Amino acid sequence: MTYSGWTIELDVPTRKYRTPRVYEQTITLAGRSLRQLFVQDLGHDEPTILLTNQRHTPAKALLTRYAQRMLIENALSDAVRFFHIDALSSSVGLKVDFDMALLVLASGLYRLIAQRMRGYADAQARQIFRDLIDMPADITVSEKEVEVSFHRRAHLPILLASDLMEKPIAVPWWNGLPLRLTTYDGRQNKPST
C-alpha cells in the first residue's frame, strides 16, 4: 500500500488546530474503490480516519465538512447528557423517536434563548440552564397573562439586557395568553419595572 501525505490549512479561524497532516490511500472494500484519509494534528491523541467515496473532493473540503458535522454531533452529545436521553420515558421503540424529537426541540429552544443573551451564543445546555434558567421565580397565572417574576441574582443583568424582559410574548398554545418576564428584589410584594 502506498500513502501520499501533506499538510493543509483549514479555513476555520476560530479552530485551535488549523494545520493537520493528511495521509491518503485508495482502498477497495466490497468491490468498491474508496478514499481513506488519516488525519493527524486535529487535537486528538489518535489520528482521525475518514472513509469516503468522494474521490475528487479536495481533502481540505472534506475535513472542513467533517469539522462542521462534529460540531453538530458534539451539540447533540451535550444535549443527550444534559437532557438525560439515556433515561428514556418508555421501553417501547416508538417512544425513542419521540424522546429524541423532544431532545432536539429542547436543545433548539435553549439555543434560541442563548443567542439573545450576551456571552452565551456558544454555551452548552447545562451552562445555559445553570446560569439563565435554574433560578428562583414566582409565577402568577391570571385571566390576562402568565407572569414570571425573577428574584435578583448574579446573572440577572444578562437577562435584563436581553429583549425578553417586560415585553409580552404571545404563546399560541395558551389560547393567546401572553407570557411576561419581570424582576423583583424580594423586599417588595410587586415586581419592579
Image (spheres, rainbow, N blue to C red):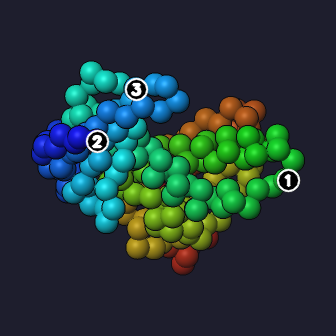
Residue at the top extreme of this rendering:
56
Residue at the front extreme of this rendering:
1
**Secondary element at tag 1:** loop
- Of residues 117 and 60, the one nearer the viewer is 60
Of the residues under marks 1 and 2, which one precedes in the sequence? 2
Q: Callout 3, which amino acid?
A: Ser
Q: CA distance from mark 2 to mark 3?
A: 14 Å
Of the residues under marks 1 and 3, which one precedes in the sequence? 3
Q: Which residue is drawn at the image coordinates 51% and 64% (left, top)?
A: 126
**Secondary element at tag 3:** strand
Decide: few, some or many residues near mark 2? Use Cα within 10 Å; few <14, some 14-19, many ≥20: few
**Secondary element at tag 2:** loop
Label number found at residue 91: 1
Q: Is residue 80 left or right of residue 154?
A: right
Of the residues under marks 2 and 3, which one precedes in the sequence? 2
Q: Look at the image and tell me whether residue 119 can be seen.
A: no
Q: Which residue is drawn at the image coordinates 28% and 37% (left, top)?
A: 25
Q: Which residue is drawn at the image coordinates 81% and 55% (left, top)?
A: 89
Residue that badge 2 annotates: 1
Residue 104 location, x and y as percent? 60, 43
- Of residues 138 and 57, the one nearer the viewer is 57
Q: CA distance from mark 1 to mark 3?
A: 41 Å
Q: Is residue 61 left or right of residue 69?
A: left
Q: Callout 1, which amino acid?
A: Ser
Vertical arrangement, residue 80 with respect to residue 29, above or below: below
Residue that badge 3 annotates: 33
Residue 102 location, x and y as percent? 68, 44
Q: Quadrant of residue 175?
A: top right
Decide: few, some or many residues near mark 3? Use Cα within 10 Å; few <14, some 14-19, many ≥20: few
